[in-house]
């Protein structure tokens, strides 16, 4: 969406902006925090890892916020990306 030019950008932005109002984002915060905590708990503290790929691909926080169950998200990433 970020790389799209009008009018395609506007067609995608309108429904997305309704989904991410300040109130809705605040309501998602506990679930997003729980998902991030879960992902970070799986990290070996003695091994280096890349934080951004570990938390953003696949978009764990987004799928959790969208209401995908843990079982449906299972297997999308078995562990954070290691360096």
Image (cartoon, rainbow, N blue to C red):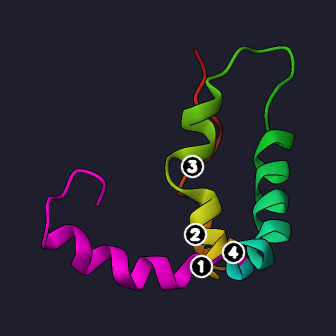
Q: For the residue carrying disc 2, how many other residues have a C-alpha within 10 Å: few (<14), some (14-19), or many (20+)?
A: some
First in residue order: circle 4 vs circle 1: 4
30 left or right, relative to 62:
right
Q: Nearer the viewer, residue 27 or 39?
A: 27
Indicate the secondary structure of the residue bearing disc 4: helix
Q: Residue at x 85, y 14 (%)?
A: 46
First in residue order: circle 2 vs circle 3: 2
First in residue order: circle 4 vs circle 2: 4
Q: Residue at x 58, y 65 (%)?
A: 62
Q: Residue at x 58, y 14 (%)?
A: 83
Q: Which residue is mark 4?
A: 22
The residues tagged by marks 3 and 1 sit, at their Cα atoms, a distance apart of: 17 Å
Indicate the secondary structure of the residue bearing disc 3: loop
Q: Nearer the viewer, mark 2 or mark 3?
A: 2
Are discs 3 and 1 less than 8 Å apart at CB? no
17 left or right, relative to 74:
left
Q: Nearer the viewer, residue 21 or 27?
A: 21
Q: Residue at x 15, y 71 (%)?
A: 8
Q: Which residue is mark 2?
A: 63
Residue 66's tag is: 1
User: Quadrant of the rendered structure where residue 74 is?
Assistant: bottom right
Are discs 4 and 2 less than 8 Å apart at CB? no
Are discs 1 and 2 less than 8 Å apart at CB? yes
Q: Position of residue 34 (x, y in %)?
A: 85, 61
**Magenta part of the chain:** 1-22
Q: Which residue is mark 3?
A: 77
Q: Position of residue 48 (x, y in %)?
A: 71, 14
Q: Nearer the viewer, mark 3 or mark 1?
A: 1
Residue 62: in magenta span:
no
Q: For the residue carrying disc 3, how many other residues have a C-alpha within 10 Å: few (<14), some (14-19), or many (20+)?
A: some
Q: For the residue carrying disc 1, how many other residues have a C-alpha within 10 Å: few (<14), some (14-19), or many (20+)?
A: few
User: Quadrant of the rendered structure where residue 81 is?
Assistant: top right
């Amino acid at each position: 969406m970020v790389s799209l030019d009008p009018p395609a950008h506007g067609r995608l932005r309108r429904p997305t902006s309704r989904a991410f109002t300040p109130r809705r984002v605040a309501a998602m915060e506990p679930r997003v925090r729980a998902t991030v905590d879960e992902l970070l708990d799986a990290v070996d503290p003695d091994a280096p890892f890349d934080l951004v790929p570990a938390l953003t691909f696949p978009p764990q926080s987004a799928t959790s916020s969208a209401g995908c169950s843990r079982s449906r998200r299972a297997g999308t990433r078995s562990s954070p990306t290691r360096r």
